Amino acid sequence: MKGHPLPEEWWRERPEIVTDIFFSKTPRAIRTDATLIYYAVGRGCVCGVVQVTGPASTAFTPPASWNAAQRAKFPVKMPVKLQWRCRADANAVSFKKVHGKRVGQGSYQKLDDREAEEFISSIRQRAVP
């Protein structure tokens, strides 16, 4: 979000995205066992790797910290398991440096295998416990 970048230690301040990923509509291209790479909105870097562990659902209780606008904007969630995380700071790998383009408007976008492998390797090298 413009003006509200993801915190550097996002897993502490946004614990809901450690166990779930949220969407504005049901993602058709993401299935159970898919690998997702987290992009730090407002910082331009990648900062996490998760594996999807179940199907999309609208039957869930939104995080208590969410306001009404967030609840309305993200009515779909998928459970995930965190594989690796790194700080969303100046040491994290730039999305644009690897992908060559800016992030699109959607909730997600497909990467080619080379880009995905480079992002995952970079996050793993910078991983924090």
Image: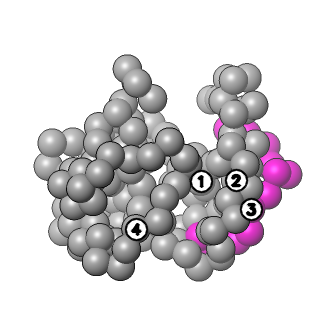
- Earlier in the chain: of badge 2 and badge 4, it is 2
Q: CA distance from mark 3 to mark 1?
A: 9 Å
Describe the element under mark 2 as helix, strand or loop: strand
Q: Which residue is mark 4?
A: 111
Name, please, the residue furthest toward the front.
Answer: 101
Task: Say what amino acid the circle numbered 4 marks.
Answer: Leu
Label 2 with label 3: CB-CB less than 8 Å: yes
Tell me whether circle 2 and circle 1 mark residues in contact (CB < 8 Å): yes
Residue sitting at 65 percent across and 74 percent down? Answer: 31
CA gap, disc 2 to disc 1? Answer: 5 Å
Q: Is residue 25 above or below residue 117?
A: above
Please give left or right for residue 105 compared with residue 121 in the image. Answer: right
Front disc: 2 or 4: 4
Which residue is identified by label 1?
21
- Whether residue 92 appears in magenta in the rendering, the answer is no
Instruction: Tell me the magenta residue range.
Output: 52-63
| Amino acid type of the residue that numbered disc 2 sits on in the rendered structure | Lys
Q: Is residue 74 in sight in this rendering?
A: yes
Q: Please name the residue that numbered disc 2 is placed on.
A: 77
Q: Secondary structure at mark 1?
A: strand
Q: Earlier in the sequence, mark 4 or mark 1?
A: 1
